[in-house]
Amino acid sequence: MDFGLREEERLFKESVSEFLRKEVGEKWKAIDEQGFIPTELIHKMGEHGFFAIPIPEEHGGQGGSFLLAALAAEEIGYHDPSMSLAVFTLLNNAWPFVLYLYGSPEAKDRILDTVAKGRGFFGIASTEPRGGSDVAGIETRAEKSGGGWIVNGEKIYISGVREAMEQLDVGGWLLLARTGKPEARHRGITAFCLIGNYNGEKAKGLEYSILDTIGRHGISTGVLTLRNVKIANNMVVGSENKGFYIAMEGFNLARILVAAANVGAARWALERAVEWARGRTLFEKPIASFQGVSFPLAEVAAELESVKLLVYKAAWMADKIYTRKEPGLKPKDLSFYSASAKLKAVELSLRASEHLMKILGAASYVKETDVFRNFLGVLSYAVGAEGTQNIMRYIIAREVIGKEYTG
Ligand SMILES: Cc1cc2nc3c(=O)[nH]c(=O)nc-3n(C[C@H](O)[C@H](O)[C@H](O)COP(=O)(O)OP(=O)(O)OC[C@H]3O[C@@H](n4cnc5c(N)ncnc54)[C@H](O)[C@@H]3O)c2cc1C
């Protein structure tokens, strides 16, 4: 057993960190304040190999692994603790990978290479106004028409709407739509490659708007309204009525990267808290000498180490299943690790952020210290993004106790 990274993994992590120190530095605060990631920075991140990391090179990707993608996400979470750069990066690793696995040659051709180069965006459009957790209950409908499909419905809280539709050359989502009867639940859903914008050509019938979110402002969150949007047959991802399973594979992969980004953000919060606790003197002593201050930080440090190992293990499992394709493993074998990693990393990251704010006292409550940006960014994952914490608990319970008991 070896807990260390391989030389090439360590070097990659360092190169990501070096890039972010140079290209982002303190600019993460301005990115959050202004509400967008500069296009130039996205291009540079693409050139540096931040996107489509686990996709083989012959399909337009970087030919790396999920562990490398997790290491990148971790460093990004550390260097931009408001999480916007991390969200952009993790989506553009997990969801293009799903397209690589199940998309048609035409769909891959249009998306993968562009995303890898930092000129495109590919995310997930699953959530609807009636609720996101019950994916099997979605109502957006796709009907067969001629040689393709006509789609009607509404998707809400969708990440990357402005980036996909306005900022980058190409943008789209893995769209889930009902193709079977509502009673068929998860067995009646198909996944489509919805290309909203292809070099300025917008999908007809697709309208969008941007929501006014409370945090992680650097990446947009919006609404997609589909009115008779035509999708060609070759944009079906996987087979008809199998979209639910495909989306669950994508969520498993994305959640590992969410967890990795939160490990990075928790490390950032811990370092800031330690720095402040050492430097602030009260009652003629540094506040770090009070156990009421140091013990919560000790807890965060201990949990950070354990959660990091869990996240790396989940990424390692993903590589065993998807990039090394070891025999005897199924995509479903990832669910426990992926849900556990997301559950624990987000809880830790939120707690680390809360401790940081409390240790700063009133200083944390003014915009100038910027720590609220970290708290609100991490909160997006506690309230819903990539699945709520209760849904993670449900998945873990199902894996541990059995589906027949947990429903
Ligand atoms: C910033 C942000 C970005 C997002 N980006 C995307 C995106 O790009 N694409 C996308 O498709 N979606 C996106 N989402 C939506 C996200 O997937 C949903 O928030 C999530 O699935 C939960 O759905 P909901 O918010 O409608 O909550 P609901 O599903 O209405 O849940 C409400 C509450 O009920 C609890 N609950 C529900 N079911 C159960 C159960 N069976 N057992 C116990 N508790 C339960 C939940 O845990 C939650 O606390 C984003 C969300 C946010 C906040």
Image: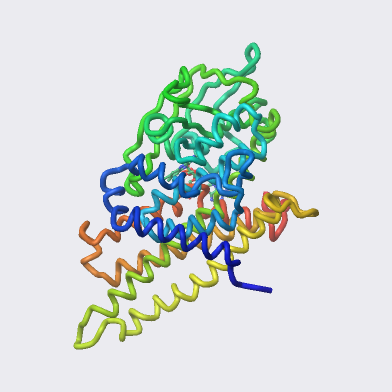
Question: Residue drawn 26% across and 50% down?
Answer: 30
Question: Residue drawn 56% across and 60% down?
Answer: 341
As drawn, 33 above or below 220: below
**Visible in this render: residue 8?**
yes
Judged left or right of residue 345, residue 396 is right
321, 119: nearer the viewer: 119
Residue 339 in percent (x, y) is at 59, 56
Judged left or right of residue 366, residue 323 is right
What is the quadrant of residue 175 in the picture?
top right
Question: Residue drawn 60% across and 66% down?
Answer: 6
| Residue at the extreme right of the image, as rendered | 328
Residue 135 in percent (x, y) is at 58, 39
Residue 176 in percent (x, y) is at 58, 32
176, 132: nearer the viewer: 176
Judged left or right of residue 258, residue 272 is left
What is the quadrant of residue 143 in the picture?
top right
